[in-house]
Image (cartoon, rainbow, N blue to C red):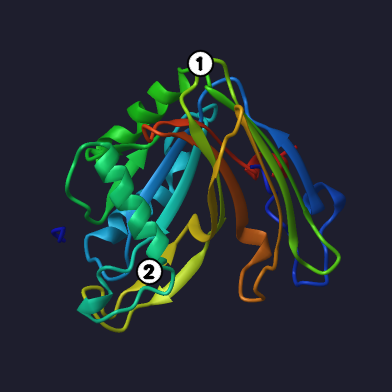
Amino acid sequence: MNSRVFALCIFAVASMTALAPAAFAACDARSGPKTAALVELYTSEGCSSCPPADRQLSRLRQMLDPAAEVVPLALHVGYWDYIGWKDPYAQAAFGERQSGLVRAGRQNTVYTPQFFVGGTELRSWRGGLRDQVRQLNALPAAADIHLRARLTAEGALALDVDATARAGAEPAALYLALAESGLVSKVMRGENSGVTLTHDHVVRKWIGPVRLTGGTARVQREIALPAAWSRARLDLVAFVQGESSSVLQAMSAQQCAGS
């Protein structure tokens, strides 16, 4: 289609009232010494070119070396809704963020599917994701993130996340994203009419930017989780992004699931 223009555990819970064992009911993790690669895919259910990119994002971790540090996110945009199918996962803020990343890269075109790795556009995503992730992982992190998350007795998600920029880092902001995997849609209209689509790492909740003041930022928040969201397939992502759009560090709460 042509264009127009950290870590939260995977909660193994069956319902709001059936809490998981302690290992999954709470998470406390810190980012590592090297830069994790934040991979953002801007996509839409109204875009016939997007399903291959969606699949690439879904299998990204399997494509990479087991030691690779990668944090995938799928941000659905709504500017193709006019074609005939309203993307149920699209948020206006994601289109605005995409436009901001394009401007930061001194480009002038937003389109789908569009990948950004570490805040920089990657057009050669079919063959270039491995190398881009490897290059970022070779860099020392310019920020540190400490993520604490727990499921409350009421079924809400309680977050306490702080970020600290390292000496010499550019001005930056902290962002949080709550993402869900295993989503399935039967598209009835538009370019993908009649197609059943499966999505992973879909951003459901977005918090930020929270500016780092004096080199630090903290977010304490309690988030109500809609009953329709699968607790077993939720992930929490935290990242620090500089004014230049470069991502100083990112982390996913998935590491708590294996701890």
Instruction: Identify the residue at image location x=17%, y=50%.
Output: 109
The residue wearing badge 2 is 197
Amino acid at pointer 1: Gly
> What element does badge 1 sit on?
loop
Q: Which mark is residue 168?
A: 1
Residue 149 location, x and y as percent?
Answer: 74, 49
Q: Is residue 228 left or right of residue 246?
A: right
Instruction: Identify the residue at image location x=27%, y=49%.
Output: 114
Amino acid at pointer 2: Leu
Residue 156 location, x and y as percent?
Answer: 75, 65
Q: Residue furthest front?
A: 214
The CA distance from mark 1 to mark 2 is 44 Å
Instruction: Identify the residue at image location x=61%, y=59%.
Output: 233
From this view, report whether residue 90 is shown above or below residue 31.
below
In front of the other: 213 or 193: 213
> What element does badge 2 sit on?
strand
Q: Quadrant of residue 146?
A: top right
Q: Is residue 8 left or right of residue 33?
A: right
Residue 16 location, x and y as percent?
Answer: 77, 72
Q: Give the number of callouts.
A: 2
Q: Which mark is residue 246?
A: none
